Structures are given as structure tokens and as C-alpha cells.
Image (cartoon, coloured by chain):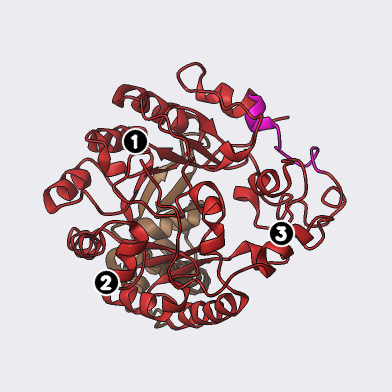
Chain colours: A brown, B red
Amino acid sequence: MNPLTLQDRAQLAAHARIQTDRITGQTVLLFPEGILKLNETSSAILERCDGRTISEAIADLAQHYEVPDSELQADVLEFLEDLQRRQLLRLS
Amino acid sequence: MTAPRPYALLAEVTYRCPLHCPYCSNPLQQDLGAELTTAEWSRVLEEAAALGVLQVGFSGGEPLARPDLTDLIAAARTAGLFTNVLTSGVGLNTSRLAELRSSGLDSIQLSLQADEADLADSIAGTRAHRIKLDAAKWIKEAGLPLSLNVVLHRHNLDRLPQILNLAEELGAQRLELANTQYYGWALKNRAHLLPTKHQVDTARAVAEAAQKRLAGRMDIFYVLPDYYETRPKPCLAGWGQRYLTINPLGEVLPCPTAFSIPGLAFPNVRQHSLQWIWEESDAFNRFRGTAWMPEPCQSCDRREIDFGGCRCQAALLLGDATATDPVCTLSPRHQVVENIVSNIQASDARPEWEMRTF
């Protein structure tokens, strides 16, 4: 498995689905044999994984939260690498 | 006791199956007369989603034997469930697959019996292997993730390297290597299915090496052969904690093999709401939590890790569903499992197992 770079364009794999949990109202990621509960930040990251580069997604997210890019970078990469390990990311 | 929230439903929509696998976990006696209808399943799927269920697996038997499977998938999607079909592949073709896909199917798990046709077909009791290879190809072409399941036992465990190669060739994203669990038909055929210690040790090393080698490309989920373990498998993360099974007749069970427990009556969705069954019924509360546990489980620091092990196994091997799973070396009756394992007749070249019938 190659480590992610900021220049990768990451999108959610076609076989995973984001949904609102009927019980908690929380955002959940559903995929074969698995469920991930997403917190607000992870949902916000995934919303921005729409074909732009990871670096662009981070910049947009940083602007949204009004923090410097560098503050988000490690957390975003860690989250996306977790998805990558679960084969839930499509990279281009 | 307050009931937790269920997350996953196994919907056994039919017991009918074109295969005759001698390790089938379905009950030996099946009443084929009264399968839930499309309307009944649709109602139950909505009830399950309202309780908290997020994932449904359509299983059986062979779920493709239900002509209304597309309707059931559509109903599940309407309820907001992530849908998975667990199939032998027999009954699949490209147009059926397209229908399933457009009704909202999210994923398919395809079973294989071995890596090559002669052995696979002798295990399945029918010529299914080539059909399965086609099915795997169609699933990939349809853009669905390919998930494979192989039940392992004495007669295919040594082929694990070849099985792994085949899964790689087919482009599987997930491979479940499930050592046989001894319930239903598998228990009946245990003498012919149970592998030797040597086979088990070799296979485990092969599986672990493959897990490392294929990390990020193919998820390999290795279900341990629990007769050879020192601690029992956790009963589906605890009885009545996260999972429920509904059988073709509408009976609701905490796990697919809970029918093995004598004296436990399973409430039916034709008579009760799923919510009542999950929260209030005796069947779901009997072994929920830790209060029911005997010693050594009650004071064991693993009581909420393995939940006393498998209730069905305790019932089947000891005749007492409230006992510690005898697979556990801490069980006062662990000797029962040791005796089974030490009595294996390894020279079983031509298995005389009893094939599953309809």
C-alpha cells in the first residue's frame, strides 16, 4: 500500500455510502461488512473528497474552520489512510 | 435489562439451495412450507431499520432462489439499509445481476468451495464451480466489490495457497476464510470435516502471510478453527447485543445457529413486532449481558471480551447452554473438546459425509 500524498485525488469508493443514522442523526459510513461513525470533521473531509487533490480539500476545510492548513494536515491524512487501508478510497 | 441497539440483520430468506455442502449451518430439519412473503419481509426490514439496524445480509439457503429478491433489496434500500447478498452464484446471470444492482444492491459475497472444479464440485455436491467463476467475473464487471467466502475443512485446508491465488486472480477485495463451525450439517459430518492440528497450524501461517502481503488490496478475514483455540469465539459480540437473524419462516434468532439450543422458543415476526422480540422476548434476554454466566466466566476478566463463548456450542457439546463454552481451556469440561480433536481419523481420503438435502 503506497502512502498518500497531498497531490493524490481521493474519492470515496463506489461501494461505500454516507448516510444519516435514523437513531442518532449522526453521519455514518456504510460499506461491506462494516460501519464507521463519522464525527463532524471526518464528514467535512469526506464531503470535500470529490476529485480535488487532498491538499485542495485541506485548504478548503481550513478556510471553513478558519485555521491554518498545517493544523489539519496530519489528522486528515491519518483519517484518509485509515479509509485507504479499508479499501474505501478511490485514488487518481 | 435495557436492550442495546442492533446493527446488522441476517435475513435468511429461504432454506432452498441448489448446493449440498456437508458443512451447511442450516438446521437438519426444515419446514419448507411457510416462507415469509415479500410484503412480510418489507415490513420486517422497515422495523429492523427503525430499531437501528444499518446493514442487512440476504442469505439462506440460496437467496437467488427467491424470485422476489430484487423487491426485498429495494425494500431494504427504502428503509435505508446497506444491502449484501450472500450467494453460491447459482442462479446468477448478467441480467439478474443488473436487476439486483438497479434495485439497490450494495455488495455481494460469493462462496467458493475450493480452488479447482473437481474438489469444489465434490464438496458442493453439484457442478457449481465454473458457474461461480463466471459469477465472480460478472460481479466485477458490474462494478461491485467482489467478496469471496470459502468454508475451510480437512478436505480443502491444504489448498489454501491455491485458494488465495484464485481469489487474487479473480480480483477479490475481501476474502473470508471461514474454518468450519460445527453446527447443523457440519456437526453431523464433523468426523469427516475436522482438520488435523498440523493442517490448522500450516494454514494459519499461510493466511497470516497473505494478510501481510495483500494488505490494502485484499482484506483477508480468517475465522479461527475454534476447537483448536484456547479461548472461545465471542458469540456475535454478545448474545442479543448487535446482531439478529430472521429465518425463512419468520422466527427471530440471536444468531443463525441458535436453533441448536433445546428449550429456547423463537418468537415469530408474524406474531410480534421486531421491537418486542429484540427488547422483551425471553429468547433475546436469556443470555444477554453477564448475569446468566456460570463460573469460571462470572469472575473472568474476559467475560465481556468473549461473553462465555458460544451458547450453541455449550448446548451441543455439553447438553447445557448455560455452561462455559468447552473450547475454553478454563472450562471445567474442556476435556470434551480435547477428546474430539484427539480422535480425528486423519486418513480420510474418501469422505463419507452426508450431503445436505433440501
Give the residue at mark 1: B76
Q: How many marks?
A: 3
- The answer to which image quadrant residue B136 occupies is bottom left
Chain that bears disc 2: B
Residue B34 covered by magenta stretch: no
Gap between marks 2 and 3 measured at Cα: 35 Å
- Give the crowd class for mark 3: few <14, some 14-19, many >=20 residues within 10 Å: many
- Residue at numbered disc 3: B327
In the figure, residue B4 lies in which quadrant? top right
B283 part of magenta stretch: yes
Asked if the residue under mark 1 is in contact with the one under mark 3, i.e. CB atoms within 8 Å, the reply is no
Say which element carries label 1. Answer: helix
Quarter in which the C terminus of chain B is drawn: top left
Q: Which residue is mark 2?
A: B170
Chain ID of residue with mark 3:
B
Q: Residue at x 40, y 28 (%)?
A: B46
